[in-house]
Image: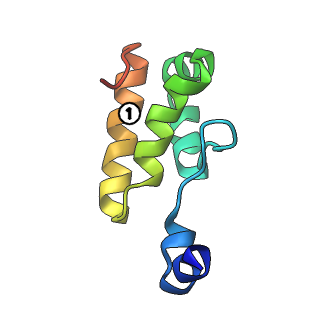
C-alpha cells in the first residue's frame, strides 16, 4: 500500500539509489572529464566516499543548484578534498 501511494504521489520516482547501484550522472561525469585531477581522485575513491558526492547531486532539486554543486565538487576533488 505504501509503495503504491509513493508511486502515485511521485515519491517513488524521487527516491535515490543505494551506494551499491548508484551511477555517476552524465552531467557530473562530463564535469569530471573537464578536470583530469578531479576525475583521477574521484575514480580512486571508495564506494562510500563516491556515494557522498553522488547522493548530494542526485537529491538536489533545482537545476541551477545542481550545476553549482557539481562545479564546487569538481573543485574540491581537484584539490583532493572530500565532503564532510
Q: Looking at the rendering, which quadrant does residue 70 occupy?
A: top left
Q: Residue at x 54, y 51 (%)?
A: 27
The residue closer to the viewer here, 32 or 22, is: 22
Q: Secondary structure at mark 1?
A: helix
Spot occupied by residue 40 in the image (x, y as percentages of width and height): 58, 17
Q: Position of residue 60 (x, y in %)?
A: 37, 56
Indicate the quadrant where residue 18 lies.
Answer: top right
Q: Is residue 17 above or below residue 33?
A: below
Determine crowd level at label 1: few under 14, some 14-19, many 20+ residues with C-alpha closer than 10 A.
Answer: many
Residue farthest toward the front in the current orientation of the protein: 1
Display colour scheme: rainbow
Image side of residue 46 versus residue 35, left or right: right
In terms of image quadrants, where is residue 45?
A: top right
Most foreground residue, 82 or 64: 82
Residue 56 is situated, as x and y percent measured from the top left of the image, at 40, 44
Assign the C terminus to one quadrant of the image.
top left
Quick one: which residue is furthest to the bottom in this view?
Answer: 8
User: How many marks do you count on the picture?
Assistant: 1
> Residue at image x 60%, y 37%?
19
User: In the picture shown, does residue 69 fall above or below 82?
Assistant: below
Q: Is residue 24 left or right of residue 10?
A: right
Q: Which residue is mark 1?
A: 73
83 sits left or right of 2 in the view: left
Look at the image and tell me in which quarter the N terminus lies: bottom right
Q: Residue furthest right?
A: 21
Viewer-proximal residue among 2 and 47: 2
> In the rendered image of this protein, does residue 21 appear above or below residue 41?
below
Q: Residue at x 42, y 54 (%)?
A: 59
In the figure, 46 relative to 19: above or below? Answer: above
Rendered residue at 41%/13% (across/down): 80
Amino acid at each position: 500500500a505504501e509503495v503504491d501511494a509513493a508511486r502515485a504521489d511521485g515519491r517513488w520516482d524521487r527516491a535515490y539509489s543505494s551506494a551499491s547501484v548508484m551511477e555517476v550522472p552524465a552531467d557530473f561525469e562530463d564535469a569530471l572529464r573537464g578536470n583530469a585531477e578531479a576525475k583521477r581522485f574521484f575514480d580512486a575513491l571508495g564506494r562510500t566516499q563516491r556515494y557522498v558526492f553522488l547522493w548530494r547531486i542526485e537529491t538536489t532539486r533545482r537545476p541551477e543548484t545542481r550545476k553549482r554543486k557539481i562545479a564546487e565538487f569538481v573543485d574540491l576533488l581537484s584539490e583532493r578534498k572530500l565532503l564532510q
